[in-house]
Image (cartoon, rainbow, N blue to C red):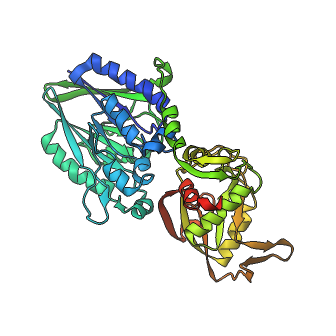
Amino acid sequence: MDIHIFHTNDVHSHLHNYKKQMQYIKDKRAEYGDLMLYVDIGDHVDRAHPYTEATLGSANVKLLNEAGCDVATIGNNEGITLPKETLMHLYDDADFDVVCVNLRDVDTDSLVFKPYTVKEVRGVRIGFVAATVEFTPFYLAEGFLVEGAFQYLEHYLAELEEITDCIVVLSHLGKFDEERIAETFPSVDVVLGAHTHHHYPKGAVVSDTLISAAGRYGEYTGHVTLSFEDKNMVAKRAELIKTDMLVGVEENYYQVGKSLLEKMVVVENSVPVTRDLYSISEFTYTFMQMLKRFTETDVALIHAGLVADAFEGGTLTQFDLHRILPHSINAVRVEITGRELKEIYSLANQHEFKDRILNGLGFRGDIFGVFLMDGLEVVELERKFLIGGELVVDSATYTIGTLDMYTFGRIFPQFKNAKKEYMMPEFLRDIVYKYKEML
């Protein structure tokens, strides 16, 4: 007997692709009937899409229901781009089980979702257990605990070994940790992977565990076939189905989201917003003022490419604001020394990234653009640095309001080990809305 598990991951609200995947999954359900299960391994939600933004992810849950999802877990886009209460109730209307071993509420230390579920397919009991990536400081800022994925997996796998014939791990931990799961836990038969956007055309086998992952943006649908004799697994294999090869279907999700957001007016008479990648604009200057106010800091630091689209002025709606700042980026308040502030200024003015096309880190634009700073006055010929008219002292402490994407050490090493306060859950467009009277 063959049992078929279809899987998606990191769709990131690429709903045109997902519409085709939905139809394919429905067709396969008609073909395989009760010998088929469908699971999603997280980051289905991405607020860069207007439909997701307008519904704060509930539209994605509705689509997973429509696709006949059986089990899902969350990725970081569900976990840290939605307000806490929204995530706590995101799956209230889900027709599928949501599982995750390592997401807990700070206040109660209780699991947000159940750790695992068991699905019986013609007498074969398949256990599904899941873990999500440990973006600890971001989750803490939202009121969640997320550490200890492997310890919790070990605990719940011991329980599943007693009550199942097959164990499948839904891993939104990334490629390296998927391999580590396979090497660490011999009871795991299959790992379905996500987060690092990798894919295996025919799966990979590590320590007799089959690993399958389906890339990103709905480019592939994964298909794992498990062959059983009685309740004993005798074979397992994986393949990917390329979405470009599937029959096209009509969808209007973008227009639906656009219509919903256009009904929400931000400002009646807004100034125009220009897209200036290599210089400061009226909007980016105003936004840095907003950022300093929001983070209560001395200095603001952003990059010009944050403005992803222009706006001609007039009635500014939530749709326009979403076009201008579509990013899944939060503000952060960082404490640094005067010496580090000078180093950051020097690095920013090298403009190493200004022409780069950037993907990831929450950025949903294209070209990075130049760095922009406000609050720091520099007299270049004299190499004087001043804040509020006072000379910057190397050993003194200053605060900078900037973007979470800069704090991983790749761009500014000074931020990596600095004292940081992530300002959650507001995105950059939420900050603009908060101080809309400044437009």
User: Which residue shows up at 69% across the image and 44% down it?
Assistant: 310
Q: Position of residue 336 (x, y in %)?
A: 60, 74
User: Is residue 394 placed above or below 50 in the rendered structure?
Assistant: below
Using the image as rendered, state which of residue 243 and residue 168 is in the foreground. Answer: 243
Q: Quadrant of the N terminus?
A: top left
Using the image as rendered, state which of residue 245 and residue 306 is in the foreground. Answer: 306
Q: Position of residue 253 (x, y in %)?
A: 48, 32
Q: Quadrant of the C terminus?
A: bottom right
Q: Position of residue 144 (x, y in %)?
A: 35, 60
Q: Is residue 160 visible?
A: yes
User: Is residue 231 placed above or below 373 in the rendered structure?
Assistant: above
Is residue 240 shown left or right of residue 183?
right
Q: Position of residue 159 (x, y in %)?
A: 16, 48
Using the image as rendered, state which of residue 255 and residue 228 is in the foreground. Answer: 255
Q: Is residue 201 visible?
A: no
Is residue 370 shown left or right of residue 261?
right
User: Which residue shows up at 47% across the image and 26% down it?
Assistant: 251
The number of discs equals 0
In the picture as drawn, the residue positioned furthest to the right comes out as: 381
Using the image as rendered, state which of residue 434 and residue 30 is in the foreground. Answer: 434
User: Which residue shows up at 51% across the image and 33% down it?
Assistant: 254
Is residue 60 shown left or right of residue 161?
right
User: Which residue shows up at 26% across the image and 56% down it?
Assistant: 111
User: Is residue 141 placed above or below 132 in the rendered structure?
Assistant: below
The picture quadrant where one finds residue 201 is top left
The picture quadrant where one finds residue 384 is bottom right
